[in-house]
Amino acid sequence: MSGMTRLAVKVSPDARTERVDLGADAYPVISEAVQGDIEPVTLAEDFEFYANENGWAEFSPLERNPLAEAVQLGCLGAANPIVGPVIFTGGIDEAGETRGLSETRAALVEQLAMMLRGEA
């Protein structure tokens, strides 16, 4: 898993991705990635993303995140509009800790981002 303890993938509104290590304390990493207060969107037991809870107040409607919306629609059958950057993680474990993404899920997010950018 590329040497990261707890892998996450940050996705900007323009579908650029960045692999991130959640480290020992995931909250500040997630908050920094979404640029503010965090709101989880659970997609599956081992797959979720966090968005900025106040996204509509803090970002322009032009900064919608089409990848987050598409993944939400694909996993849940419906989607709320998401603005600003998001960060994908591996869900929450029994102790309430944020898990890292599997390499398979991370690669899926990156592949979808490449498709949205017209590079795949």
Image (cartoon, rainbow, N blue to C red):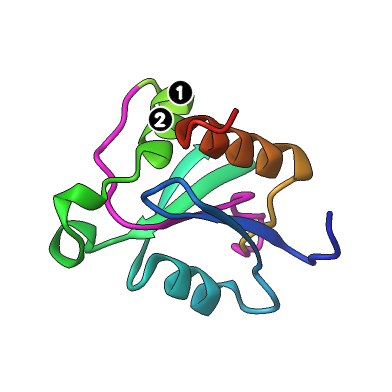
- The amino acid at mark 1 is Gly
Rendered view: 36 above or below 96: below
Which percent across, then down, holds residue 94? 66, 55
How many residues crowd around disc 2 within 10 Å: few (fewer than 14), some, or many (20 or more)? some
Q: Residue at x 49, y 31 (%)?
A: 118
Pointer 2 residue:
70
Tell me the distance, in whole angstroms, between the alpha carbons under discs 1 and 2. 6 Å
Residue at 23 percent of width and 59 percent of height: 55
Determine the main secondary structure of the stretch shown in magenta. Answer: loop
Bounds of the magenta segment: 78-97
Rendered residue at 16%/57% (across/down)? 60
Image quarter (top left, top right, bottom left or bottom right) of the N terminus: bottom right
Q: Quadrant of residue 97?
A: bottom right
Kindly identify the residue that appears in the image at 79 percent across and 67 percent down: 5
Q: Helix or strand or loop: what does disc 2 sit on?
A: helix
Q: Is residue 115 above or below residue 67?
A: above
Locate residue 31, reporting x and y percent.
Answer: 43, 72
- Mark number, residue 46: none
